[in-house]
Image (cartoon, rainbow, N blue to C red):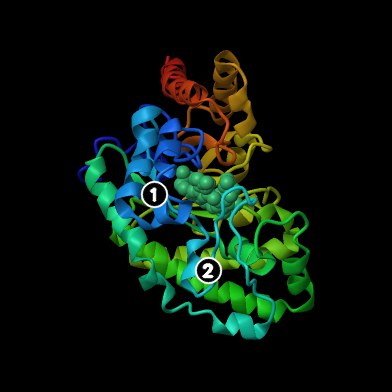
Amino acid sequence: MPNLKNDLLLRAARREPTERTPVWMMRQAGRYLPEYRAVRAKADFLTLCKTPELAAEVTIQPVDLVGVDAAIIFSDILVIPEAMGMELLVEEGKGGPRFPTPLRSTADIEKLDAAAAPERLQYVYDALSTTKKQLDGRVPLIGFAGAPWTLASYAVEGGGSKNFETVKGMLYDAPEALHALLGKLADATAEYLVLQTRAGADIVQIFDTWAGILSKDAFLEFSLPYMMRIIEHVKANSDVPVIMFAKGANTDFPELAASGADVLGLDWTVDIGEVRDAVGTQVALQGNMDPVALYSSPESIRAEVRRILEYFGNNPGHIFNLGHGILPTVPPAHAKAMIDAVKEISVEIRAEEQE
Ligand code: CP3
């Protein structure tokens, strides 16, 4: 990997041996850091995403402050539906981002402009190239996008949801409409990720946050094939590894491992050693500490890190992470305790088993 002083993440993603286990955290650039809140006090969330200098600043904060082995570009998965023509609102204290005019009909879906979306996201590519320059090879830079199924859930529900009855209504009553929407989201996202790699992303992650609300059949029909379409396009047009995080899709490891992804992200409910046994050496694994464990004492955090590293064992292909995003009220010192523990204990484990 030219010009990278720390390429542990990329080697682990390719299942090459590493001196220690690389570690980063989903949502690592965010509200648990006072330094992030200070930048956010000056700009609303979407302005932050759309101002490359500010996005680069908060992207690099966790590298400096907690010592992660990668930076993930500061942005959001919902910029894709926005770039396809949907109005996106992120208002203070209103329960997360929302689409005030959600998709409800085939006509709504037909209006979405998938072809124009990738070029409308120039601010993301500018944030990536600015960040890449400022990182100066210290750690790899992760690009990302939402999975078509997760994006469709937000675009059809209009925001977060408890039971997802509107998008599931479409799934059961109008599957052709949902397939049309998923196809458009996949096409836009595939090209978006390729353009992210051209702007400096060393690796990309697909977030399927809502994979786990689908039945097995529905996941295999409405989510996985669209992620595979994206992976195929990224692989055909770049040489970066792809991480697929299908949260809660825990009955589908053989299918996930055969998807073309280099790395599978795991939530905290599974035993990473059992998953490793199930998928063999086809893919690397990322995860999988319970994000809520970061509220416990540094000693308990260390014990939990050790447990996960030992379950994975002294094998290539582990990227340590949380099983979902870090929560906004976690003390930064606890995040740092986890990261330091991964760095120290993974070296011990490698030494022990070589004796
Ligand atoms: O990981 C990182 O640090 C990079 C930045 C990043 C954000 N969102 C910033 C953000 C990433 C990778 C995301 C992905 C994302 N966005 C997902 C998938 C990952 C996951 O956590 O499941 C989803 C579902 C979204 C949609 C989204 N954006 C929601 C539901 C929310 C509100 C909930 C919340 O955590 O506040 C957002 C807003 C958002 N995206 C914030 C951040 C830092 C908080 C906004 C703020 O600063 O006020």
Rendered residue at 45%/67% (across/down): 190
102 or 348: which is nearer to us?
102
Q: Nearer the viewer, residue 243 or 44?
A: 44
The residue that mark 2 highlights is 81
For residue 35, side relative to residue 259 (left or right):
left
For the point 55% across and 16% down, the residue is 298
Occupied quadrant, residue 14: top left
Could you say where residue 80 lies in the image, as x and y percent from the top left? Answer: 49, 66
Answer left or right for 108 relative to 240: right
Residue toward you, 124 or 36: 36
Residue 73, disc = 1
Residue 16, position in %: x, y? 38, 39
Q: What residue is at 53 percent from the left and 26 percent from the top?
A: 309
Given the current orientation, which residue lies at the most extreme front position? 42
Three-letter residue code for mark 1: Ile
Disc 1 Cβ-to-ligand 1 distance below 8 Å: yes
